[in-house]
Image: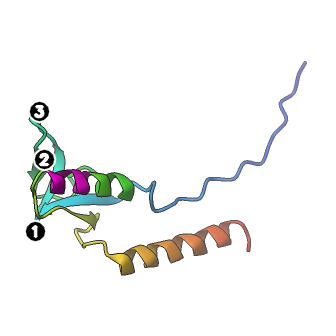
Amino acid sequence: METKKKTNQRRPVRVIEDANMYLLQLAPGLFYFRTAGDGKPMDVAAPSVATHMSYKDADSLCVKFRAMGYNGPVVADIYGRLIDNEALGAERRIQAEKSAKFRGE
């Protein structure tokens, strides 16, 4: 009879680029829901109904829609607040602290 060796696996640290906690704000109060068949973005007024995605994915869509001529797309958090460099830096610090605490540092 074979016994399985139990390994101590650590939970992966959440990184800002992979967290599904960002929205794409197309215009004030309107958030990305999905892309229509013609490639144009469809919007919704309720952030909770909008597509939640990683920062990287939201930023990529933002670049795509700006290239199509849309002027309003920006990345927002799940509360509808715009993400700027200050917000990204704060999130990175929080995640670094959580990671260090998790590892016992």
Q: Is residue 17 left or right of residue 67?
A: right
Q: Is residue 77 left or right of residue 94?
A: left
| Image point (10%, 57%), residue name | 70
Quarter of the view holding residue 86: bottom left
Count of numbered tags: 3
Vertical arrangement, residue 68 with respect to residue 36, above or below: below
Residue 28, which numbered label? 1
Residue 41, which numbered label? 2
Q: Residues within 10 Å of mark 3 (few under 14, many from 20)?
A: few
Residue 12, percent across and down? 61, 53
Q: Are marks 1 and 3 in contact (CB under 8 Å)?
A: no
Q: Residues within 10 Å of mark 2 (few under 14, many from 20)?
A: some
Q: Residues within 10 Å of mark 1 (few under 14, many from 20)?
A: few
Q: Is residue 93 left or right of residue 87?
A: right
| Image point (69%, 53%), residue name | 10
Quarter of the view holding residue 34: top left
**Which residue is more in the foreground, 89 or 20?**
89
* Real-space CA distance between mark 2 and mark 3, rounded to the nearest whole angstrom: 9 Å
Magenta span: helix, strand or loop, mainly? helix
Vertical arrangement, residue 11 with respect to residue 86, above or below: above
Residue 73, percent across and down? 17, 61
Q: Amino acid at mark 3?
A: Gly
Give the labeled residue for mark 3. Answer: 37
| Image point (63%, 53%), residue name | 11
Outermost residue toward the top? 1
* Real-space CA distance between mark 1 and mark 3, rounded to the nearest whole angstrom: 24 Å
Q: Amino acid at mark 2?
A: Pro
Circle 2 — which element?
strand
Closer to the eye: label 1 or 3: 3
Which residue range is magenta in the image?
61-67
